[in-house]
Amino acid sequence: MTEQLPPDVITQLRAMDPAVTPELGQATWALLTPFHEKIGYTAPRIHRDLRYGDHPRHRLDVHTADGAAGRPAPVFLFVHGGGFTGGDKHVPGTPRYDLVGAWAVRHGWVGVTMTYRLAPEHTWPSGAQDVAGAVRWIRENIAGYGGDPARIVVAGNSAGAVHVASFVTGQGGGSLDGVRGAALLSGIYQLRPPGPGEPEHAYYGPDPGPAASTLPGLPDCPVPLLFSVAERDPGPFHAQAAAVVSAWQSRHGTVPDLVWVEGHNHMSTIASLGIDETALGVPLARFVERHTEGASA
Amino acid sequence: MTEQLPPDVITQLRAMDPAVTPELGQATWALLTPFHEKIGYTAPRIHRDLRYGDHPRHRLDVHTADGAAGRPAPVFLFVHGGGFTGGDKHVPGTPRYDLVGAWAVRHGWVGVTMTYRLAPEHTWPSGAQDVAGAVRWIRENIAGYGGDPARIVVAGNSAGAVHVASFVTGQGGGSLDGVRGAALLSGIYQLRPPGPGEPEHAYYGPDPGPAASTLPGLPDCPVPLLFSVAERDPGPFHAQAAAVVSAWQSRHGTVPDLVWVEGHNHMSTIASLGIDETALGVPLARFVERHTEGASA
């Protein structure tokens, strides 16, 4: 459970240009995929492409252990990134993002990976609505897969973190019943309108408006939160993390649960699960375990 | 290596009044000492009360494995807390703070625990001078105990963190040669003069003055830093952590390596080493390993 990447791999990660580009994704996954292949990145059972809504992107995969379960298990729902306009829960032949389901199952939970509607066709708050839809599906169906509908933790990275933040602060409607925690990995919480000469935002449009920013609502969110930022995340993600710390401290007098993901970049943070557990996996698992202890439904 | 406290123990810790009082210390150690007794809190060999200076408090203990070492090991130096006026490296018959030496040795390092001069007899920057003195002693002597004088990480908690911060920002003089990192656990970095009716500070006197605060210097400190704050640290420690995040982000455009110690309080953070590794031990060990890799002296 405490697999760790060799120091030279971290050195290679740290040497990459941290800008969030397809090249960074390619280099990161090329470097890390062999480690996932070595430990195995698929759960014993994967139930693919279950529908949680009408749109073709309203699909999710459920990852479970083999055989009979005892007590219903906590459910770990993962929302992928991709700049609001791309990404998928499952890229066949790669660890993306079956690895997250496998990691959840290894911890004794049920894993769920979901796909959602994309910009520019679908704009704010469609992402939050889709997370709400997947959570509703989980509440109604996950018992059939050994999961506990009353013990759900939702995690997202990058655009996925934005959608999860948007969901837990109520932007997309839907119920938070059963949601015991949310993990926001390398997200953006304070939006700004495009500057002069900048294109309008594919998901938020020409003017996000104050209602789209989750920063003001996050410190009062009824769901326990974990934030993370990667050592090699570009500056804007660090600025967002610092803004969250400041807003949280102003509101609660404490800093939030923030994980600084040592040695990793914007792409490798989620890829570290299972193969570099001391970076993100250990504190994230502790967060899930803490908030899913105790009575179930 | 990944011992974890049972959830009910964390629940008991979380239920304690977080104010930093002797009662909190007593309750915390009463709760956690049995776990240390179970795993053992003494390294195979402890060399007690070696002198690093002329004052009776200029003493340190060196904690090592039994038998012959291979390559000289990294050295982990721990500076205890105690409100500047109390505390000791070793309270006989208790895990304080042999447990830190044992934790270091379990990780393959040499542990050193030190005592320093106390206020009000000894005032700022005597603590920084004493840390510098112990580090100098390590550089000159630790090879004889299997340690590598070129790979030292210094950690302190509470007043100990203040002294370590003071040392690495140059307040006490002394060389940083061989110091590869510093871990500042629940420290105070921005001082303020006593308010009306408040007693003067035992260590800083009536007016700390801007030179005593380490916050302005920490972001430019030549030594890599890890900060931690406990979930149940009182507000002022969280305010300090938030101030560090803000200052760091302003200076570097990134947030610093900050560990939020889940479920723990001001006293139990250091007590978590060895018995609740996923709280502080895992990220702290990763920090030490990262910064002590590579060439030695």
Image (spheres, coloured by chain):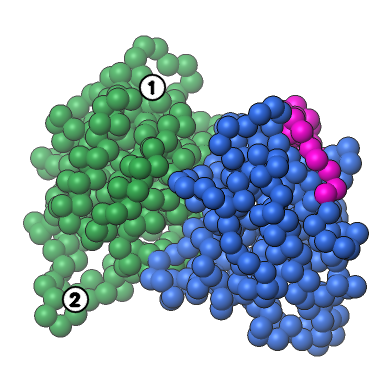
Chain colours: A blue, B green
The numbered disc on residue A269 is none
Disc 1: CA contacts within 10 A as few (<14), some (14-19) or many (>=20): many
Name the residue type under label 2: Pro
Q: What residue lies at 60% left-to-right and 72% top-to-bottom?
A: A169
Q: Within the magenta stretch, is there residue A36?
A: yes
The location of residue B121, given as percent across then percent down, is: 8, 56
Q: What residue lies at 74% left-to-right and 34% top-to-bottom?
A: A43
The location of residue B263, given as percent across then percent down, is: 39, 50
Instruction: State the image quarter where residue B152 is shown.
Output: top left
Of badges 2 and 1, the one in the foreground is: 2
The location of residue A259, given as percent across then percent down, is: 54, 54
The numbered disc on residue B146 is 1
Q: Which of marks 1 and 2 precedes in the sequence? A: 1
Work out whether residue A246 can be spotted: yes
Rendered position, B180 above or below A129: above
Disc 2: CA contacts within 10 A as few (<14), some (14-19) or many (>=20): some
Pointer 2: what residue? B194
Q: CA distance from mark 2 to mark 1?
A: 45 Å
Disc 1 secondary structure class: loop
Name the residue type under label 1: Gly
Magenta region: A25-50
> Is residue A156 or residue B260 the one in the foreground?
A156
Disc 2 secondary structure class: loop
Is A277 on the left-hand or right-hand side of A21?
left
Q: Within the magenta stretch, is there residue A274?
A: no
Q: What residue lies at 23% left-to-right and 71% top-to-bottom?
A: B208
* Mark count: 2
Q: Chain of mark 1?
A: B
Instruction: State the image quarter where residue A198 is shown.
Output: bottom right
Is A174 on the left-hand or right-hand side of B237?
right
Work out whether residue A287 can be spotted: no
